[in-house]
Image (tube, helix red, strand yellow):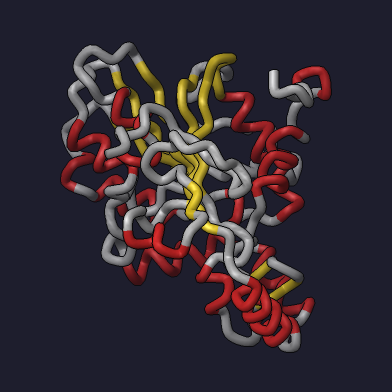
Amino acid sequence: MHPIKATSSVVPVDDTACDHTFGSRTLNEDDDVWSHNAWDHVVPPQEHSNMVEELLAKQAASRVSHEDAAVYHANPAAYWDTFYSRHENRFFKDRKWLRLEFPELIQATQPDAPPTTIVEMGCGAGNTVFPLLSMNQNPALRLVACDYAPQAVQVVRNHPLYQNQQTCEAHVYDLSAGARGEVERLPPNVQPGSVDVVVLVFVLSALHPDEWKAAAENVYRMLKPSGLVLLRDYGRHDLPQLRFKKNRMLEDNFYNSCIFLTLRLVALILMNALPRSKWPSTDGS
């Protein structure tokens, strides 16, 4: 039996190492699906690729008009405000996969953990911060939950676990602050270089490409030099993308509620916010 992961990771599908832990293995044989879990890596067959091309072609045949797209991009927070006004905390479930995918978060809640500041962007209804808050035994843990939809932040503040505690605070904050010339670029009570972990779950995909650079700059600005970014997002050709119907596509892989990413694109988004002198070298160092 493979051990539980000690650190977050991602493995390219062409990596054939045999010692990958839970959620990080590559399926090479058809029978492997019966002995491995659903989050392992598998190279899709050609017929799947053909199906993807057909579905994307149908979506592209009925793109959203430029006028309608401009209306959405003018105020995307309003869309999410309406969403959380309607659903409150009933739509998304608590993220039980945190323990498996981001063990660093669980380690920060242990009684012997050092003082740790965790900032979550796009906190929504609190489906990350509340599981952490409920298990926390670290008196020096600080959780900062941020979302650009005021209604989402209010849902967090109204939660029973949020009341009468000093560990978690919630703020209305747009991670892309600066893309439009704003002066204040960090969340309230968050100082530059003070954050140990920034959590980005389905965040980059919700931003317009014009906002990516400012968002990444703000992440780096708040992180300590040894800080960590924990990222999970929609991948190119994920099932949600293939399920979109007509009048949802704006451009290739870009829809009126999210963009579907690749590992290379995510790397470019994060690297482009850094001086070239801080880019990782090609030898992996």
> Going by the picture, which residue comes out furthest to the right?
276
Residue nearer the viewer, 96 or 122: 96
The percent coordinates of residue 197 (x first, y second) are 46, 27
Q: Quadrant of residue 140?
A: top left
Q: Is residue 90 left or right of residue 143?
A: left
Q: Quadrant of residue 184?
A: top right
Q: Is residue 29 left or right of residue 94?
A: right
Number of dots carrying numbers: 0
The percent coordinates of residue 213 (x first, y second) are 73, 40
The percent coordinates of residue 91 (x first, y second) are 32, 66
Q: Quadrant of residue 48?
A: bottom right
Q: Quadrant of the C terminus?
A: top right
- In the image, residue 49 sits, relative to residue 218, either above or below, namely below
- In the image, residue 174 sits, relative to residue 79, either above or below, namely above
The percent coordinates of residue 92 (x first, y second) are 33, 61
Name the residue located 28 percent from the left edge and 15 percent from the top edge.
Answer: 113
Name the residue located 47 percent from the left edge and 38 percent from the top edge.
Answer: 18
- In the image, residue 16 sits, relative to residue 242, either above or below, namely above
Q: Quadrant of the N terminus?
A: top left
Residue nearer the viewer, 258 or 148: 258
- In the image, residue 27 sits, relative to residue 277, either above or below, namely below
Name the residue located 58 percent from the left edge and 19 percent from the top edge.
Answer: 192
Q: Is residue 45 left or right of residue 121?
A: right
Report whether residue 148 is seen: no
Name the residue located 53 percent from the left edge and 78 percent from the top edge.
Answer: 243
Report whether residue 210 is seen: yes
